[in-house]
Amino acid sequence: LELLLGTSLFVGREGFRLALTKEVSEHNSTVNDDVGDREYDENERNKNQSNMKQKQGMHTRQKIVNVSWLSIPTGAVLSIAALIMHLHSCKYLSLPKTDAATSDDLARLNAFDYKIAGMLFCLASFIESLAEPLIIRCL
């Protein structure tokens, strides 16, 4: 069950974490230096460049926030896929019912508990994926 949870969480969030927490390289915007060099003095040009960099930084942060919210539906889909795989594998754990065997009853009860535990692990995986955008924002 730990493997089920770990796989679902790893596949669902590590790609987003690696992609979104990398240091964003600044875009080198080309400013047309031929036009307007004589009209603006050096202070205004520096002010315009700093405003442009600030707008690019805000735009980049907004992109990161927007993409980080995609981790929730990805986590939900992976949790549902893990749940389906778990339920499918639990189908083969059920033993045929016999009348006099108490050990079979115990095995059936353990298989039922294993099925419920797997369902709870998949639910926990989905709940953890709900927090992922906030974790990415903090990183």
Image (cartoon, rainbow, N blue to C red):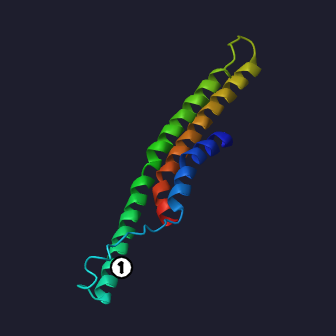
| Tag 1 secondary structure | helix
Residue 91's place in the image compared with 132, above or below, is above
Please tell me which residue is depicted at 63% across the width and 42% down the height of the picture. 7
Which residue is the extreme one toward the top?
A: 99
For the residue pair 116 and 16, the one nearer the viewer reads as 16
Residue 7's place in the image compared with 135, above or below, is above
Q: Which quadrant of the rendered structure holds the N terminus?
A: top right
Please tell me which residue is depicted at 42% across the width and 53% down the height of the picture. 67
Q: Is residue 100 left or right of residue 138?
A: right
Which residue is the extreme one toward the front?
A: 34
Please tell me which residue is depicted at 32% across the width and 77% down the height of the picture. 33
Give percent across and percent down for residue 129. 50, 49
Which residue, given by chain and number where applicable, does mark 1 sit on? 50
Question: How many marks overall?
Answer: 1
**Identity of the amino acid at label 1?**
Ser
Give percent across and percent down for residue 42. 32, 88
Q: Quadrant of residue 114?
A: top right
For the residue pair 86 and 27, the one nearer the viewer reads as 27
Q: Residues within 10 Å of mark 1 (few under 14, many from 20)?
A: few
Please tell me which residue is depicted at 49% across the width and 54% down the height of the picture. 132
Q: Is residue 30 left or right of residue 132?
A: left
For the residue pair 135 and 66, the one nearer the viewer reads as 66
Which residue is the extreme one toward the left?
A: 39
Q: Is residue 86 left or right of residue 49?
A: right
Q: Quadrant of residue 101?
A: top right
Residue 75's place in the image compared with 18, above or below, is above
Give percent across and percent down for residue 75. 50, 44
